[in-house]
Amino acid sequence: MANEETIIQFRGATKVYKLRKKEVLAVDKLTLDVEKGEVFGIIGYSGAGKSTAIRMINQLEALTSGKLTVLGQDVGRLNESQLKALRAEIGMVFQLFNLFNAKTIAKNIEFPLKLAKWTPEKRKARVAELLDFVGMSDKANVYPPELSGGQKQRVGIARALATNPKILLADEVTSALDPETTIDVLNLLKKVNKEFGVTIVMITHAMNVASYICDKIAVMDDAKLVEFGTAAEIFTAPKHPTTVRFVKTATESDVSDKILSELVVRHPDLAPEIDDLFKEVHNV
Amino acid sequence: MFEHIIIESTATGSTNWEYLTPLLNRAVFETLYMVAMTIGIGGVIGLLLGLVLYSTRPSNLFQNTVVYRVLDFVVNVIRPIPFIIFLTAIRPLTISVIGTSIGTDAAVFPMVIICSVATSRIVEQNLVGTDPGIIEAARSMGCSRMRTLFTVLIPEALSPLILGYAFLFVAVTDMSAMAGMIAGGGLGDFAISYGYRQMDDVVTWVAIAIIIVFVQLVQQLANFFAKRLLHK
């Protein structure tokens, strides 16, 4: 039984794609709980089903079978207008930003507010506030093609937060960014989570990204959930072979020190284990 | 009357512009009329058909295999018919719609049909080239399918669409030159009647020069707006 703080609840959620006569199982009986206020990571290689799983939450992908409850609503039973209302509560940020290139930065951020029928004055104030939050106030009237990747992602985050959603879906948001910009964007997401209490569900194929920001991590492989635990548990004691491989790649990466020190801060109880890991990484 | 002109123009060795200028003006007007009507009506019908073609494609906003296949087939059947044959082939339909099968309006009717079909493909192809991630972003915000199509997708593809319409404009001008076949008038008719048939090449060249200037102006204008809309 899920507790009342459960904001997203997958119960045997399954997605089967029909490609001509062949059926492809993309997500196989996924059962997961995402608690309110946490940063939840789904990690897996490409083709593992994580993109489909995250898109089930805002119904960009319908379920073939099983059940998914988001913010107390069974998403499989929503009609178009209920779905529209639900989507206003769920922001989404994308790997390749998906900004509207024909609209200025300000108009990009304003777009979801127009959809939600905010008045022009309220929209203007909200856009200014968001631009300030992501540090892009000077770029309000610029078009997306003029921005760097990191700047585009900041705009993407501002746009996703426009309507004050309760949930933010992050789809490989740092995969197209360099390591430093990655840390910047992840810090911004942390700020979103801490300051606004927005629940974040992120998918990534980079273990270092997941462990830097996520409270809990679910590992998917071949359409199935293969391991689940807190970031510290997954990082210090991986069980499934896929998870072991992911942890190995993370410790070999150049941001691993930052991740390890971050883990110590967040999980002081695990400090000895993390310290061992640190020594192992640096061959001390 | 005609013999008099032939005699005069061959006798003096120069073109009788006093006689031809009013005819040329009329031909220019007819061409502008045919092109404007065709682009105005056919361009809008074509835009709508193009949106249907694009959005009913598999895994698109209004995915509908039956609608897509039927429309796709119709477009493919009509498009390759040479215009000069099409113009005469749909004569019964032209009569029932326009009331006559000769004259400028009778020429505009088949031009509108061909223009609609050609436009639909150009619109479809330009929209197919837009990033599907943009649709996904709009949908994730709760944007309706229709609204996504008109307020997100079309603005995103506007720059190539403008160039596509400029391309169509040239094709329509080309079609309008064949209107003479059914007494539709226009610059093509003028060039054939008073240039080619009178063996007066200067008249033909003048008609060509006017068409070139006309097309250039439109293309330059389209290039200007397309570039401004790119924001790069």
Image (cartoon, coloured by chain):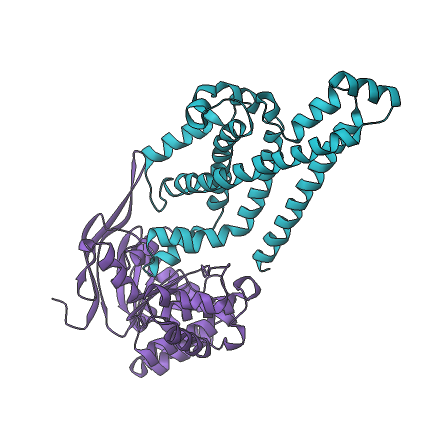
Residue B70 image point, x, y percent:
36, 30
Image-quadrant location for residue B216: top right
Query: What residue is shown at x 47% (from left), y 69% (from top)?
Result: A106
Residue B134 can be seen, yes or no: no
Hue used for the chain lettered A:
purple
Q: Residue at the top extreme? A: B3
Q: Nearer the viewer, residue B212 or A246?
A: B212
Dividing the picture into quadrants, the one containing residue B202 is top right
In the image, A74 versus A43, the foreground residue is A74
Q: Position of residue A151 (x, y in %)?
A: 51, 69
Residue B133 picture location, percent across and down = 42, 54
Q: Residue most toward the left? A: A1
B148 horizontally vs B184: left or right: left
Left or right, A211 with respect to B108, comes to left
Check the image and report above or below for B115 versus A184: above
In the rendered picture of this protein, how many numbered marks are placed on residues?
0
Residue drawn at x 48%, y 77% is A135
The residue at the far right in this view is B12
Q: Quadrant of residue B227?
A: bottom right
Colour in which the image shows chain B? cyan
Image quarter of the N terminus of chain A: bottom left
Q: Is residue A108 above or below residue A30?
A: below
Q: Which of these two is toward me, B227 or A86?
A: B227
Q: List x then y, in percent, for residue A225.
A: 26, 57
- Residue B184 seen in render: yes
Q: Residue at the far front: name it.
A: B1
Left or right of residue A53: residue A96: right
Residue appearing at x 52%, y 63% in the figure = A144
Tell me the residue at 53%/72% (across/down). Answer: A139
Q: Is residue B110 above or below residue A4?
A: above
